[in-house]
Amino acid sequence: MPKVHLLDYVAGNIRSLVNAIEKCGYEVEWIKSPEDVKNADKIILPGVGHFGHCLSSLSSAGYLPAIQEHISSGKPFFGICVGLQALFAGSEEAPSVPGLNLIPTSLKRFSPTNADGSRKSVPCIGWNDASTSTSTSPTTSDASTSNQTSMYGLNPSSKYYYVHSYFAPYTPGHLEREGWTVATARYGDETYIGAIARGNTFATQFHPEKSGAAGLRVIKAFLDGDKVTPSTTPAVVPGSTTVRAGATTKRNVKASTNGLTRRIIACLDVRTNDAGDLVVTKGDQYDVREKSEGGNVRNLGKPVEMARRYYTQGADEVTFLNITSFRDCPITDLPMLEILRRTSETVFVPLTIGGGIRDMVDPVSGQKVSALDVAKLYFASGADKVSIGSDAVLAAEAFWSRGGDGDDDTSIETISAAYGAQAVVVSVDPKRIYVKTEEEAQAAKTKGHTVIKTTDKDSEGREYVWFACTIKGGREVRDFDVVKLVTACERLGAGEILLNAIDRDGSNRGFDLELVALVKSVVEIPVIASSGAGKPGHFEEVFNATDVDAALGAGMFHRGEYTVAQVKEQLGQAGLLVRPFEQFEP
Ligand code: 1PR
């Protein structure tokens, strides 16, 4: 097998990139010292997390001059994410740390508001263009205005997975005059560099190894040295009758989240059943046992196979939750590690793992294991994000009891510092607490709870509600409000909120729109709506009624009632932007 050299310096989920390279028919050789760079022909430099951390690590290990030499000698180089950012002069993220300065401009942070006052989530997480089209407006471009050729397999009608808070601003003409070819993306009113190439140097802000078939095509083009590729067949946008380059039909322009597609996530709750097998299960308000006699754990299928099925159907992300993680488990035997390893061999979209991310004592060795160490194992096994539930509630309570301050030692802070905010999801499991009168509502407010008047009254007709946090899979309700939780977690360094709703879980009644709108209004980071999806129309409803960034379904997919493809079809027909279906033939 032909070889490519990979420079790993704790860049997070490197396993998925290795899997993607192997899928393209190449073998990975690791660069272990600056000397190895000299002997390498093709180099890939992946990167996630903090610009300053990445560049300082590369610099102190002596890699920067070696990389510079490699690039100027004209050998193939591919930088991914922070690997692209490294080519620039520097970044607002770490003003004192210099980059390679191949491009003498600096990266900026996304603003959470557009010029017209509308909001956008930061970090920017989701699927967007890398368009070499000559049109500057990706939502209106068509085949007649796009280039007839494209660099490194990029397709103007494909979507690619981005996750970043800092971006390289794009000014038309400027870099082209220096010999660069640029593919752009737009986030709100900011247009930035999605991919860039000159000579044998190529870099993408998006993660090709997480961008499904479209991304695998880009990796293969780099590895094969296909710098200029004929424009591929336009990707098919679900729900559209006309297909054209530029990714979207005019109907899809109606509602878009600042240029990102609507993200659909398939979630698999995993645990061992009574026979000791790891199965995907699904609760009814978190009760996962059959109602029939015997009350066995519902067995809906095998995790790896189901993840693969949802990927094939077009899921934009897959989330695994180990729902019995409150029980201590030996670190060497974490059940989800093998699931992740195997899933990441065939599923090339982001994978999130939740359950049991906390400091623990290994029941076998008696050794203390930090949340960061647990997370490291998951990232090394193929996870892109970890999701923290119970531990986040306890950390948020402590945050407020310290007067709104972290202690630099919580799971959120330590993992976010090491891997970046985008790698830390907080999974929230709130429960509705109804109160009857305005006086009772006032009393709840005095305790710091956010009380709203609800249209979804309870059986006693009570119309005021606040949302209480729970821990240990809903088993313990805390006198602590969801708004307090999510605002504390954002300040501690979480990058995304996975918002469940115990009352809606498994109910097929649709998402809790009031809860979603409330949480979305108090944080800047992306929010994923979860719990209650029973049909494709529920996804359309939550995207139309709120500004939520992504929506997640479980039971309706597992029970085979609907496919992910049907959800996307419906969204596309309703004029909501979704990622096109594509296939990759190595
Ligand atoms: O507290 O950090 O160890 O994490 C445990 C994780 O496991 C939490 O994220 C918690 O949400 C989850 N969890 C624990 N117990 C259960 C249970 O069901 N008994 N599952 C559970 C929660 C949430 C979604 C779910 C949606 C959509 N499940 O995964 O599938 O509600 O379902 P639907 O579309 O069928 O309505 P920690």
Image (cartoon, rainbow, N blue to C red):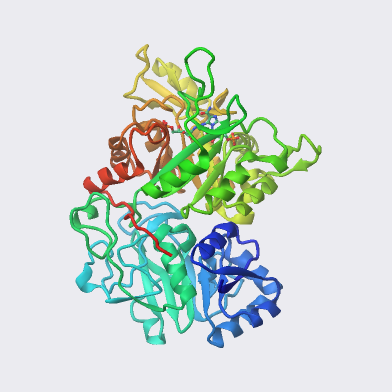
Image position of 121 with respect to 143: above or below: above
Give whichever of 125, 313 is nearer the camera: 313
On the rendered structure, is 542 left or right of 76?
left
Would residue 1 be visible to someone looking at this image? Answer: yes
Task: Give x and y (percent) for residue 340.
Answer: 57, 47
Most distant residue in the right direction: 366
On the rendered structure, is 126 left or right of 329?
left
Give whichever of 235, 65 is nearer the camera: 235
Residue drawn at (60%, 33%), measured in percent from left and top? 390
Task: Give x and y (percent) for residue 128.
Answer: 37, 59
Instruction: Look at the image and tell me in which quarter the C terminus lies.
Output: bottom left
Image position of 300 with respect to 257: above or below: above
Instruction: Determine the image quadrant of residue 55.
Output: bottom right
Image position of 353 with respect to 228: above or below: above
Instruction: Determine the image quadrant of residue 516.
Output: top left
Residue drawn at (57%, 73%), measured in percent from left and top? 4
Instruction: Look at the image and tell me in which quarter the N terminus lies.
Output: bottom right
